[in-house]
Amino acid sequence: MTTRLPKKDVVIIGLGWTGSIMANELTGEGLEVVAIERGPWRDAPTDFPPTYMQDELRYRVRHELFLRPEQLTFTFRNKMDQTALPIRSWGAFMPPNGVGGGGVHWNAEMWRFLPSDFVLKTHLTERYGASFLPDDMTIQDWGITYDELEPFYDRFEYLCGTSGTAGNLRGQIMEGGNPFEGSRSRPYPTPAQAQPFSHTLFGKAARELGYKPFPQPSGNLSQAYTNPLGMKMGPCTYCGFCEWFGCSNYSKASPQTTILPYLVRKPNFTARDNSEVIRINLDRSGKRATGVTFVDTSGETWEQPADLVILSAYTLFNVQLLLHSKIGRPYDPVAGTGTVGRNYTHQTISTVNGFFDPKKFNFNPFIASGAIGMCIDEFNGDNFDHGPHGFVGGGYMGQVQTGARPIESTLVPPGTPKWGAAWKSAVKENYLSTVKPGTGVHGSFYAYKDIYLDLDPTYSDRFGRPLMRITMDLKENELKQNRFLTDKFAEIIKAMGASKLDVQYRKGPYDITTYQTTHLNGGAVMGSDPTTSVINRYLQSWDVPNLFVLGASAFPQNAGYNPTLTVGALAFWAATAIRTKYLKSPGRLVDA
Amino acid sequence: MRRRSRHLFAVTALLLSTAPCYAGGSDPQEFTQIERGRYLTILSDCASCHTVPGGNQPFAGGRAIETPFGNIVAPNITPDPETGIGSWSDEQFDAAVRKGIGPDGSRLYPAMPYNAYTKMSRDDVLAIRAYLNTLTPVRNAVTADTLPFPFNIRTAMRVWDALYFQQGEYRPDPSKSAEWNRGAFLVDGPGHCGACHTPKTVLGGDKAAQYLQGSYLQGWSAPDITNDARVGVGKWSKEDLVSYLKAGHNRMTAATGPMGEVVTLSTAHMSDPDLDAIATYLKSLPGKTGGASPPPARTPTSTTVGATFAASPLALDNPAMVAGGAIYRDQCSACHGLEGKGIEELFPSIAESSMVRSDDPTTSIRIILRGARSVGTRAQPTASGMPSYGRELDDSEIAAVLTYIRSRWGGIADPIASKQVSKVRLDTELRPD
């Protein structure tokens, strides 16, 4: 029995970064907006209090802030000829749950993609020729350019108070910033965070090797800031509990610290938490969304009708909801038809841990923020000639160590016994003098024909819907890229003065059980051709024009950067298209 | 079935509201009067008591107002003829608001601040009436007589009135500016600031000699709001006061607890000239030490239970200061800073907070024990909060850190003893708020 609720102008599925941005923009147009969020309401001072937030066991080990796989999970396999099995404990990535979404537990690295990333296929084909790309690689252009997106990168950076050093200000290369970045219209709203010792030492070593190191752009703020909505943020205190944790110091940009308190004051905004949208409803033509159906915690089913549907959940849930709602044509890798589930990607991550002489080096590694770090960008995107190397793609690399939380920061040099007194004394001896960059090499992940999402033939969820199946592996291109980048990274760690290195290349097959990043992308990609994209350049569904799909599911492939800034910029871009174009004339914004 | 009965109820309410009934002499077309009444209702903060927080029935009463004598439940002041004030005459309404006399001639309890509202004119009060008449009538019968014996004898209030109630409209002081007079009217009249900020006698009357010098109510100490430099607002500029009242935040502190509610429902909606007037008036009040001069040497008072008298800041090597300093660095400095300055309009500056150093430490102790939430306003939506340390720190640790804060950064205030913390812990443990 479904209870029908009064109609709204807009229903938003998922109240994370993109849902919050879109809700704020569309309520600004005077529209009645309801946001429906699967998880609980979360509020900075009451849910992330500094009195107990720094609890590594509770939040990091036991995944407090994340979706419980018992509620919803996915099946996984590496290759198309394998049988996928359900993921029963999160590993490679962490699906968020609750108001704020991934914006609660992220590290707040705030990177812009390179101008060439948005025209990747065209750019690489022009420079290296089509035959340089692997046959099964399905990369494509985004249908939008960096210059078009720049004002929206800027808006998201100023919403968050981003701390950084400009590298390219209105075309002029600036000392101390990233010289490879696209031209930016304004400096960062706040200066870069001060860097702790190991990060500074990385910068020095990189400079001596001829690179141009710069501070990682950070949503953990270097100083107090008031954003354009009047929201106040405080300076980061370097507590080292960002990723996996919420921040109650008001120093990490999140929907809670930058938008929500402003948004919830608006009388034309409503939020429903603990309510899981199970379907986007279509009219009889299948070309128009009529609203959504959701289930509350009592198992009651509700229908929320709306004129405009915004799908703004996490990448995997966006794709899954499209598949379950039968919107768009599911991707078939054999026939090469369909689009939903196509071009699913992750991030190619590796690291090098450096062990230094404890008598000479005390890094106080626990002093850090989530987006602290000194980085270089010489080996990202197409910033270097790939011709001699036989692969495409790249990534930034840097000492981006986000702290040294006690449970997971017990690194010992290779060859140390794995337990007992010798292990204990090695932990003690090395804790303060070890460099553990975490995601030190942050490589791109390009798209392939047989890496995709579809519905599982065997396993179903508690509503009887098929689980979504992930077919994912690491290809030779990414492995080559990673070996090249990791070796370059190891040279810098060595140059810092490390006496021992622990080089951890990313190796195949793709491992679903160990954490890499939560940067899952694609599956509902944007583009200019409806046969290879689910949404147009404005993130509007080709098939159902009153549906917009936000988030990294729109990325045709992933660049060598963290995705959130681009995700937020695209949300502002789509919101602006709705405000200035769609509301004036609801319908397709791009002719197919 | 439940839904159906609700429908029936709605129909009944509609019939009642459209049925001819006496609702005073106001004309529903009188926009000017109604609009004036709406603003006076904000100035008078009627909603604070007459609307249940978080409810969806504005002014329908039912909120229990805690007094030292027991709880008094605020009545329904919507124009419902049976359970609200719909059938009252203008005369009856005026008598209730300005004289403390109910429609049946019985005495009201001064939880209804008629001793302040008396400073308004009959026109003011009838404008409020005119506004209230435009509200949706809500059928909500409220039993107001909840006080225990002997306070339930309303005739006893005649004695109270004789002792403490001075009837009469505000009379401007011709020697002062128009702005000052407006401020005085707002503070003493509709704003009824003294209801919380002026200390009370055992009978609950104002201690007139200690006008606005701070009091205690409902588990909070309401601070001194005179211009006293040490415990009042002597170090605040007029802009600080206006910002506090309008935005709930200023460069030093933030409104929380009952005052947060006052900001949300009342002062944040006041006009800028009125806020300026309030600030001008409060800054003119000399307070107990005669204005913004340094404090004279003081003698111990009975409120400083178990604590030793401090005429000068405690030495940094005093054991309480050493312990308090260590706790401060660990637990407090991340937001409030090593120098106690906080972040403007986000984290209060406890180095400059007069509340932290007030003679009655109840609010400071309570905030450390239970945490506090500032209020979000249109001007300042963030509504930052302080976590509760009641589980993290024991009474002696809270006493030590508070002693440290009160004696640092130029502060001179009595040290806090652990039993003062225990008392507040016990008192607030069972409170719902």
Image (spheres, rainbow, N blue to C red):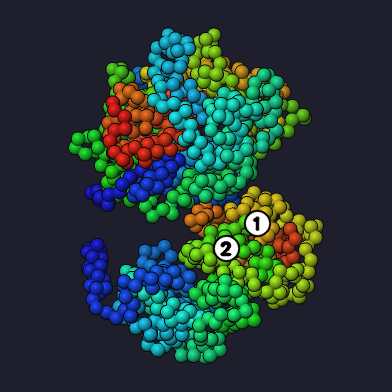
- What chain letter is assigned to the residue under label 1? B
Q: Position of residue A109 (x, y in %)?
A: 55, 34
Q: Is A104 located above or below residue A453 in the figure?
A: below
Instruction: Examine the rendered structure and indicate whether residue B309 appears above or below residue A329.
Output: below
Q: Tell me the quarter of the picture where residue A406 sits.
A: top right
Apparent side of residue A120 relative to residue A420 in the rendered image (left or right): left
- Left or right placement of residue B230 versus residue B196 in this view: right
Question: Mark 1 is on which residue type?
Answer: Ser
Q: Residue at x 39, y 30 (%)?
A: A554
Residue A88 in picture, x, y percent from top left: 42, 34
- Which residue is at a point 65% across and 21% down the rendered structure image? A211
- Look at the numbered discs 1 and 2 and tell me whether their residues touch, using CB distance below 8 Å: no
Most foreground residue, A438 or B7: B7
Left or right of B328: which side holds A115?
A: left
Residue in the image at 23% along x and 49% along y:
A1
On the image, numbered disc 2 is attached to which residue? Answer: B242
Q: Residues within 10 Å of mark 2 (few under 14, many from 20)?
A: many
Check disc 1 and report the residue beneath it.
Answer: B349
Structural crowding at the residue carrying mark 1, measured as other residues with C-alpha within 10 Å and reported as few (<14), some (14–19) or many (≥20)? many
Q: Residue at x 46, y 90 (%)?
A: B155
Q: How many marks?
A: 2
Output the chain of dot 2: B
The one nearer the camera, B154 or A216, is A216
Determine whether the residue tagged by mark 1 lies in a helix, strand or loop: loop
How far apart, in angstroms, are the residues tagged by discs 1 and 2? Answer: 17 Å
Quarter the C terminus of chain A occupies: top left
Asked whether residue A80 is in view, the answer is yes
- Relative placement, left or right, of A450 versus B317 is left
The numbered dot on residue A369 is none
Q: Amino acid at mark 2?
A: Val
